[in-house]
């Protein structure tokens, strides 16, 4: 009840409307993105060797024959979405997530080359790595395909924490050192905090170990118990999560790190790995999302339905939200805040308005409350604001993402999802 009330209040305040976010069944083939700036690309690979209970993302056990069918469907979706481009489109980045993208390492070059038929990728190409996939042969193969940034799903170096989320340690430190030795420009290590039984000392040791082994960045995420997950133990309380986040900030200062988002800390002067903080992006694959000027769409969560749709030359889109101006502005504000920066020019490019025109009252109030500081390009969130965002994001995840994903997991193409 509290989460619904909070998200509803924020939605009404930021959009100046009682209108909820309504996703409708809509498989439109045409997407208007040719003139958009700061466009990124995302590709979802749904296959894993084993399935982790804590992971909420679309995944299934790897099957070589199905993976080949999936690859052909993925190439077909790229053609379907991009065939209308009149010239190669410049994009900022390309990220492969999952699942376990390295299970399709032998096909990455073909997928990337297909995307390069339509796009000029000016930034990095990132890929999520499961520790089980880290060996010299796989790393050489993904580098040859063009990948120069990796994110390793370690979650924790502590055996007890790993056991409680159904994972086992397997020479994690050596594997990170191997990745670093291969010359990737970004080595991100994913960690989870607020795992049952975890304490601040364990968390500090996890972060310190990651950087000592060669990480250029650590992404820490609070343990969230999704309604459709099958975790044996619930995450630690919100009070403990907040305490751990404050500890993370203290540790980052002690290690002379740069805080690049609410939950991300990086060595100063290094490139950043971030697949979510993009003004606009195109998503390919089951469950992949696409965010454009006035549209947000979600592909079907079913790999079978995804493949079948592309066999029939149909869009695999399951749900589409058409934004009002203020809804789009609120979405831009929310994810910009995750990166701790509200950039005035980026906001104007997305909405056509200045951030002060749309959210003048909220900006003024936030500055008065010590949540925002003005800078030459816009505004910076303070540490106090980071703690507040940490809490709001988890409420948003439970009220919005959990509800949408649960509906998409139950039906291949739901009729409607209403987020109040």
Image: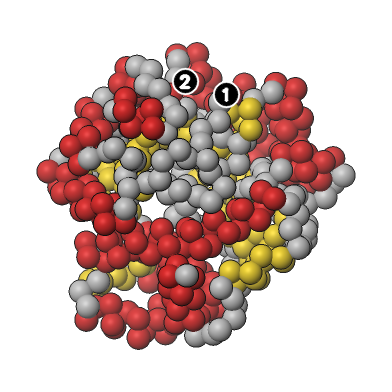
Measured in 3D between alpha carbons, the distance from the residue under mark 2 to the one under mark 1, in whole angstroms, is: 9 Å
Q: Position of residue 335 (x, y in %)?
A: 43, 62
User: In the image, is 238 to the left or to the right of 132?
Assistant: left
Give SS at disc 1: loop
Q: Residue at x 73, y 33 (%)?
A: 70
User: In the image, is 352 to the left or to the right of 171?
Assistant: right
Which mark, by number, is residue 132? 2
Q: Residue at x 59, y 76 (%)?
A: 20
- Tell me the colour scheme of the image: secondary structure
What residue is pinned by disc 1? 49
Residue 92 in sight: no
Circles 2 and 1, Cβ within 8 Å, touching? The answer is yes
Quadrant where the C terminus sits is bottom right
Q: Up-down: is 44 above or below 331?
A: above
First in residue order: circle 2 vs circle 1: 1
Give SS at disc 2: helix
Which mark, by number, is residue 290? none
Disc 1 crowd rating (10 Å Cα; few below 14, some 14-19, many 20+) is some
User: In the image, is 38 to the left or to the right of 249?
Assistant: right
Q: Position of residue 156 (x, y in %)?
A: 33, 32
């Amino acid at each position: 009840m509290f989460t619904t009330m909070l998200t509803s209040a924020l939605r009404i305040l930021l959009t100046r409307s009682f209108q909820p976010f309504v996703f409708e069944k809509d498989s439109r083939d045409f997407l208007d993105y040719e003139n958009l700036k700061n466009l990124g690309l995302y590709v979802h690979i749904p296959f894993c060797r084993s399935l982790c209970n804590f992971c909420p993302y679309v995944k299934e056990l790897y099957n070589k024959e199905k993976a080949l069918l999936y690859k052909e469907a993925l190439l077909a979706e790229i053609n379907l979405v991009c065939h209308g481009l009149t010239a190669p489109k410049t994009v900022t980045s390309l990220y492969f997530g999952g699942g376990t993208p390295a299970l399709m390492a032998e096909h990455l070059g073909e997928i990337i080359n297909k995307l390069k038929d339509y796009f000029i990728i000016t930034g990095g190409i990132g890929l999520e790595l499961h520790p089980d996939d880290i060996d010299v042969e796989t790393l050489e193969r993904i580098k040859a395909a063009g990948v120069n940034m990796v994110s390793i799903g370690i979650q924790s170096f502590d055996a007890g924490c790993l056991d409680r989320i159904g994972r086992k340690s397997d020479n994690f430190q050596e594997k990170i050192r191997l990745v670093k030795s291969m010359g990737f420009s970004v080595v991100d290590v994913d960690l989870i905090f607020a795992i049952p039984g975890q304490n601040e000392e364990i968390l500090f040791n996890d972060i310190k170990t990651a950087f000592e082994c060669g990480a250029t960045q650590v992404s820490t995420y609070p343990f969230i118990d999704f309604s459709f997950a099958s975790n044996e133990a619930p995450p630690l309380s919100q009070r403990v999560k907040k305490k751990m986040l404050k500890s993370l900030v203290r540790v980052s200062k002690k290690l002379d790190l740069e805080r690049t988002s609410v939950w991300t800390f990086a060595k100063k002067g290094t490139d950043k790995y971030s697949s979510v903080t993009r003004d606009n992006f195109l998503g390919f694959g089951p469950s992949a999302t696409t965010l454009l000027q006035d549209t947000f769409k979600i592909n079907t969560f079913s790999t079978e339905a995804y493949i079948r749709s592309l066999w029939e030359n149909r869009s695999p889109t399951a749900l589409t939200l058409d934004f009002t101006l203020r809804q789009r502005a609120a979405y831009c504000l929310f994810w910009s805040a995750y990166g701790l920066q509200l950039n005035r020019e980026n906001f104007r490019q997305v909405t056509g308005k200045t951030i002060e025109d749309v959210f003048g009252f909220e900006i003024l109030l936030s500055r008065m409350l010590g949540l925002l500081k003005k800078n030459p390009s816009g505004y910076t969130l303070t540490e106090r604001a980071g703690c507040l965002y940490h809490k709001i994001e988890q409420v948003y995840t439970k009220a919005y993402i959990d509800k949408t994903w649960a509906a998409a997991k139950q039906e291949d193409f739901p009729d409607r999802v209403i987020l109040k």
